[in-house]
Structures are given as C-alpha cells and as structure tokens.
Image (cartoon, rainbow, N blue to C red):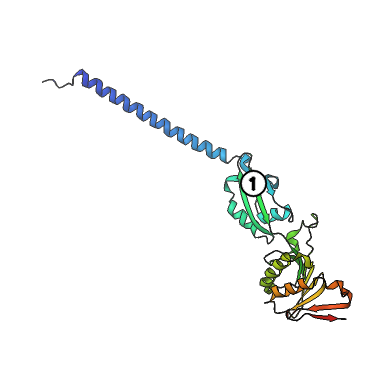
Amino acid sequence: MNSFPPPQIKYKLALLKAQDLRLSRLTLWRSCFVVFCAVSIFLLANLPYWQIKHQSQIEINGEKLISRNSIYNALKISYPQFIWKINGSNLAKQIESIPSIAGARINRIIIPPKLIISLQEKAPIALATSQGKVGFLDTNGLWIDQKFYDNISANSALPKLKVLNYQAQYQPEWVSIYQLISLYPELEITELHWTQSGNLLLHTKIGKVFLGSDLSQLKRQFKTMLKLQNLPDYIENSKIAYIDLSNPNLDLIQKY
C-alpha cells in the first residue's frame, strides 16, 4: 500500500498553502496601510494650518447696530483653536445671550479654516428710559440697555419714538400700544410717559393725551383720538394742558 499521496494531491496542497500565504501577506499589507492612513490623517488634522488663531478668521454678517467687538467678546474663544473642536451650537448660544441679538447661525469652513457668523438683530423701535437708565425697546416690549447697541450712533438709526419711565410690568400694555401706534400713524405719537403712579400720558399731533392707569380700553381711546385729530384747527395746542381720555366716553379737554 502506497503511503505517499499522489502527485495531484501534492500539487493541490502546495497551491492552497501558497494562496494562504499570499492572503496572509495581503491582510498584513492592508492592516499596515490602514494604520498608515489613520496616523497620517491624525497628524494632518493636528497641523497648525487647521487652527482658528485670530479674530480675522471669524467673519460676521448682519451686524449693523452692534459692534463686532461685542460679538468677539461674547464668543469667549481661546486661541488657537482647532476648527474640528469648535462647537457651533455653543457659540450661537453665547451670541444669542446678548439681549439685542434675536438669533445667530454658525458655519464652519474647512479650507481655509474660518467661522462665518450670521446675525439677526432685534430692531429698536423706541428710545426708552427705565429706572434711570437709557436704553431701547423692541416690538415685544423688551428693554435693552444702550450698551448692547454700541454701533447705533454710527448708523444714525435712533428711533423717533420715546418712552419715559418704562417698567417691565408695562410690557403687555406696550405690545398693544405699539400695534395701535403703527395702525394710526396720522396721530403722530412721538412720546409715551408713564408717571410714578402708573398713569400714561401721550404726546400726539393733537397735544398731550392722558390715558390714565387703566388701559383696558386702548382701542376706544385711540379711536377717540382719531376723531379729535382736527382739534388743532379750532383750539391752539398751547392753550391745552392735556386731553383727558381716561374715560373714552368723555372728551374732556383741560385748558391752562
């Protein structure tokens, strides 16, 4: 009995052994290539080129009433900073913490590395004093200190409407009042003055109008003012101390 395998089996075994050796070498080369690529990418990603090193690499769009320095200060970025490690959502929240900013969007650009910040500002629609400080009001009645509009003078964008002695508790009334002011521009309301006792006095085309502290009938009070818009043709404003519309059912003119 022959104990040696036939030549065909020897050939097949040698072929399988060669294939297995070639496969092992290929696997080893693939592993080395993967490791090489991973190390190269890591080293490439950590080159100084990919860092935000200075404010000049931060582009800001949409700023008109607030200065760029205020935005840069709010970002609180420690330089240098790798572009990969910058969290756009956190930066947006930092910018939106500025009272005069309504929204912010951050885009990261890889080549060349830079940040693009797009801003949406809150439009100041009235110059307002509150607790002895000067600031601005937006359409929702939020009082914003003037320091958060540090570029407004350069743009000559000061609102014409003035509000004196504004308090946070007047916010609901302010929203309604501003809607009516926009609805009736012919009344030419230039100033709102809340007294220490909470009464509201308006400076209008027809003179000073006293609305009182109960502003539940604002619409009727404004409609009454609209009916009186030709009053200066009959009585000089200088002779009228104020028009009392605290009760809109009574058109009471207080004369000097």
Residue nearer the viewer, 62 or 191: 191
Q: Is residue 70 left or right of residue 37?
A: right
Residue nearer the viewer, 222 or 153: 222
Q: Residue lying furthest top in this view?
A: 7
The amino acid sitting under disc 1 is: Leu
Q: How many marks are shown on the rendered structure?
A: 1
- The image quarter containing residue 142 is bottom right
Q: Is residue 165 above or below residue 147?
A: below
Locate residue 246, reporting x and y percent: 74, 80
SS class of the residue under badge 1? strand
Q: Is residue 203 visible?
A: yes
Query: Which residue is tagged 1?
Result: 115
The residue located at (56%, 37%) in the rendering is: 44
Residue density around tag 1, few if under 14, some if 14–19, many if 20 or more, within 10 Å: many
Q: Is residue 170 above or below residue 33?
A: below
Quarter of the image for the N terminus: give it.
top left
- The image quarter containing residue 145 is bottom right
Locate residue 140, reporting x and y percent: 67, 65
Locate residue 174, reporting x and y percent: 70, 70
Q: Is residue 181 above or below residue 60?
A: below
Locate residue 102, reporting x and y percent: 65, 58
- The image quarter containing residue 49 is top right
